[in-house]
DNA sequence: TATGATTCCATTTTT
DNA sequence: TGGAATCATA
């Protein structure tokens, strides 16, 4: 046991070795949460002798699940394999398949992702003769998904007005079509299982008997059905351990309910409460800044995060003229850091919305710095990837309407709109799948013979594929590509994008090969499920590049250097409500988001904001974010704000910047430190208004540059005449009564 | 059926 | 502003 729990602090130890009964762990940012969960699972297996297959650990991402398994494998070799670890969705999908017969669904049901769901809804809405402008699929999807999160089926869905009445109508029809397609959407995976658990005592008993201990990570972001699921599993043995941080709850808009963790003690009055408050990740300054900001929230579990780490450098706040200026400042600082021995993968840039990434991408490209943008379009969402998967899905489960519709005329095989409309109509009327309608239509002599022939050819194609394949995913996929001429169809486009599409197809094939090697029993069902439940962040491998992502995507990650950009009112915190009144709950969530952003940083935190920002078509004046003002002034250094931006060349930027600005000697002449681990491959060129070396140095070393007016507590106000390298830099200042050399940290710009 | 024009949309997005 | 999706037209 001692080897198992070595190096844990008393609270961590208590959490890891808690033997049973409800337990809630409030785990602040960087408090070693993952470690505790892993150690706890190991403890249960090794000490309490709980068989691994009777332990269920729920994580919020597939990546977290993988990590947990890997770590556990080191702690308790050989035990990790049979442990139940996964996201709510993955776990529930697995349980639904295992009990499919009992529940009365196809064992090989497909999982519809958001875009599949939207296609289905679009069809249902127009099938009901409704105006799709009045009832956009996206909005209806939101209502249906919310209902499922709250555990409400069409029957429980509350009708309040004419809109909800129609939504309910759509909901009913949608469920019918989903059933005909043997498809489940994301929400269904959990909702459906909960419904069945409630309705079927024998299922309930078998699930209860199966899991002896349940652990849930990121509990602050659990929604109602998810909680109901967990509660149902633990009702008897009550061995439920939940871990989370209410300050890091950032998915309220998706149904996450912080009350689940805040009110855990009401649900389980005998719950043990443990708070992990020691932070092992960040410097004192970063932690104090993050704490100070989040302390402005009213509704939170009181806690005091502390650290034994040293204070570290002050947080640098950079004021910029506009968004382009901001991008240049940040990139310049990144280059300086690279010169000072930090690697590219040590640095991350976080922003509130994806839209902000573009300017930075441009700047990074100009600076020749490799970067990686996490999120945005999921790999498996690319059209060509979806096409290939749709073929596989149809071959595997012909009833999958959405996939069938997607591929029936791709590549074009002369099955036109009218034919399809008739088919859809027949399927809806008969309550059958499209596939059934397709077969019937081919055999219906009252249909035009040309159409019947084309349909017949398509049916034969599917037949052939189904027969000739040995059903291993990769083989099947290759057969699909060759028999349908899909690659040629792409190639025929003859565009540069087509090439990258073909590459993407190749990547799918190789991921299939990989899967076949890794999986115990490779099969199409499992592969398809894996692919729909996998996100882009899950696939991302760390390369030697700077990482850019939204704050949401950064949750759970950490970096030595973190830049948070766009700290302006309206941007971060994001929008306010319509009437100008801001919603306090929303503002608190924004503040938590800010807390998450800051606490990703280990050593250095850079914040930036722009006084002017392009928003869609026009330029808006921006005010610095209140979150900056909530940071204790002592913890930060303000840089910039004094530069006026003449930049006549700015307009030339749009056409692509080619020349090297005249002033561009500063960066090239910079004396690099000896500890270089990575170097920017670019030359000394930089785009936009050039930031000279002293300015860049400001950003890094505390905002002191020649020419600036600075204040010293003893000598008063003076002007900087020179800055010498060093950390912190020594600054020569001309005071009224003579020149002095002073360490920059004793100076404040005025 | 392929293209160019037009229109629509834009917060975050663990699954 | 920019991109994706849908529409119109040859």
Image (cartoon, coloured by chain):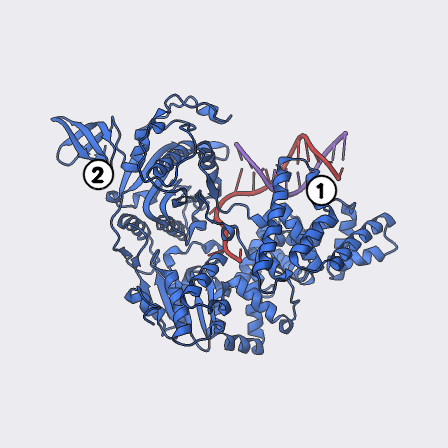
Chain colours: A blue, B red, C purple
Any part of residue A151 in sight: no
Any part of residue A188 in sight: yes
In three-dimensional space, the C-alpha distance between marks 1 and 2, rounded to whole angstroms, equals: 64 Å
Residue A165 screen position, x and y as percent: 61, 58
Examine the image and state in which quarter residue A37 appears: bottom left
Q: Is residue A428 left or right of residue A332?
A: right
Q: Is residue A118 left or right of residue A738?
A: right
Q: Which residue bears the numbered disc 2?
A: A745
Tell me if label 1 and label 2 are in contact, CB under 8 Å: no
Q: Nearer the viewer, mark 1 or mark 2?
A: 1
Q: Is residue A748 left or right of residue A512?
A: left
Number of residues whose C-alpha sits closer than 10 Å to that of mark 2, classed few (under 14), some (14–19) or many (20 or more): some
Residue reaching furthest to the left: A737
Mark 2 chain:
A
Instruction: State the residue at coordinates (11%, 26%).
Output: A737
Check the image and report above or below for A176 versus A449: below
- As helix, strand or loop, the secondary structure at mark 2 comes to helix
Quarter of the picture containing the N terminus of chain A is bottom left
Mark 1 chain:
A
Residue A563 screen position, x and y as percent: 37, 42
- Total of numbered circles in the picture? 2
Going from N to C along the chain, the mark reached first, 1 or 2, is 1
- As helix, strand or loop, the secondary structure at mark 1 comes to helix
Instruction: State the residue at coordinates (39%, 21%).
Output: A662
Q: Is residue A703 left or right of residue A357?
A: left
Quarter of the picture containing the C terminus of chain A is top left
Disc assigned to residue A462 = none
Check the image and report above or below for A310 versus A236: above
Residue A461 screen position, x and y as percent: 77, 53
Front-lying residue, A395 or A72: A72
Q: Which residue bears the numbered disc 1?
A: A488
Number of residues whose C-alpha sits closer than 10 Å to that of mark 1, classed few (under 14), some (14–19) or many (20 or more): some
């Amino acid at each position: 046991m001692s080897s198992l729990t070595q190096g844990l602090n008393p609270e961590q130890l208590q959490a890891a070795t808690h033997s049973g009964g409800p337990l809630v762990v409030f785990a602040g940012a960087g408090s070693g949460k993952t470690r505790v969960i892993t150690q706890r699972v190991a403890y249960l297996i090794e000490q309490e002798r709980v068989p691994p297959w009777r332990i269920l650990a729920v994580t919020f991402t597939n990546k977290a699940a993988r990590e947990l398994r890997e770590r556990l494998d080191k702690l308790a070799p050989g035990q990790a394999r049979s442990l139940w670890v996964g996201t709510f969705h993955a776990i529930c999908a697995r349980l639904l398949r295992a009990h499919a017969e009992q529940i009365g669904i196809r064992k090989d049901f497909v999982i519809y992702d958001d875009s599949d769901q939207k296609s289905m809804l679009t069809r249902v809405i127009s099938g009901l003769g409704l105006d799709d402008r009045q009832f956009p699929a996206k909005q209806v999807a939101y209502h249906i998904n919310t209902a499922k999160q709250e555990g409400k089926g069409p029957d429980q869905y509350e009708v309040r007005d004419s809109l909800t009445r129609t939504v309910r109508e759509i909901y009913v029809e949608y469920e019918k079509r989903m059933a005909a397609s043997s498809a489940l959407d994301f929400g269904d995976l959990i909702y459906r299982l909960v419904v069945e658990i409630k309705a079927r005592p024998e299922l309930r008993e078998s699930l209860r008997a199966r899991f002896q201990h349940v652990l849930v990570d990121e509990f602050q972001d659990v929604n109602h059905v998810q909680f109901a699921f967990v509660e149902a599993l633990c009702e008897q043995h009550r061995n439920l351990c939940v871990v989370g941080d209410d300050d890091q709850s950032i998915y309220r808009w998706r149904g996450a309910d912080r009350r689940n963790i805040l009110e855990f003690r009401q649900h389980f009055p005998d719950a043990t409460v443990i708070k992990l408050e020691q932070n092992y990740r960040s410097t004192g300054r970063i932690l104090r800044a993050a704490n100070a900001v989040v302390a402005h929230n009213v509704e939170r579990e009181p806690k005091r995060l502390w650290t034994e780490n040293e204070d570290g450098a002050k947080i640098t706040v950079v004021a910029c003229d506009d968004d382009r200026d901001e991008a240049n400042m940040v990139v310049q600082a990144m280059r300086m850091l690279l010169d000072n021995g930090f690697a590219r993968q040590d640095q991350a840039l976080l922003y509130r919305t994806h839209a902000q990434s573009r300017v930075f991408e441009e700047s990074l490209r100009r600076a020749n710095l490799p970067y990686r943008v996490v999120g945005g379009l999921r790999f498996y969402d690319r059209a060509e990837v979806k096409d290939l998967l749709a073929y596989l899905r149809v071959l595997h489960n012909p009833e999958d309407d959405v996939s069938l519709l997607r591929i029936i005329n791709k590549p074009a095989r002369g099955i036109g709109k009218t034919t399809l409309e008739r088919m859809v109509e027949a399927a809806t009327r008969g309550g059958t799948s499209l596939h059934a309608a397709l077969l019937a239509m081919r055999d219906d002599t009252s249909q035009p013979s040309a159409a019947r022939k084309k349909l017949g050819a398509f049916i034969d194609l599917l037949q052939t594929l189904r027969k000739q394949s040995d059903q291993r995913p990769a083989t099947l996929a290759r057969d699909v590509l060759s028999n349908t001429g899909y690659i040629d169809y792409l190639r025929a486009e003859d565009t540069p994008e087509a090439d990258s599409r073909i590459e993407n197809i190749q990547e799918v094939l190789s991921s299939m090969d990989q899967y076949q090697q890794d999986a115990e029993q490779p099969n199409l069902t499992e592969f398809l499920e894996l692919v729909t439940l996998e996100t882009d962040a899950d696939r991302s491998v760390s390369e030697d590049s700077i990482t850019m992502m939204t704050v949401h995507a950064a949750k759970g990650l950490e970096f030595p250097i973190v830049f948070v950009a766009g700290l302006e009112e309206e941007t971060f915190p994001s929008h306010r409500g319509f009437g100008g009144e801001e919603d306090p709950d929303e503002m608190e969530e924004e503040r938590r988001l800010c807390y998450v952003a800051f606490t990703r940083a280990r050593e250095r935190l850079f914040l930036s904001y722009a006084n002017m920002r392009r928003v869609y078509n026009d330029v808006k004046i921006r005010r610095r974010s209140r979150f900056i003002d909530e940071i204790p002034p002592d913890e930060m250094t303000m840089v910039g704000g004094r530069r006026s931006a003449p930049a006549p060349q700015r307009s030339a930027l749009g056409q692509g910047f080619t020349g090297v600005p005249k002033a561009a000697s500063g960066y090239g002449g910079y004396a690099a430190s000896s500890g270089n681990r990575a170097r920017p491959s670019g030359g000394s060129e930089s785009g936009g208004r050039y930031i000279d070396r002293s300015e860049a140095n400001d950003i890094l070393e505390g905002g002191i540059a020649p020419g600036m007016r600075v204040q010293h507590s003893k000598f008063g106000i003076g002007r900087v005449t020179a800055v010498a390298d060093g950390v912190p830099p020594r600054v020569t200042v001309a005071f009224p009564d003579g020149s002095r050399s002073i360490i920059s940290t004793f100076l404040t710009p005025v």
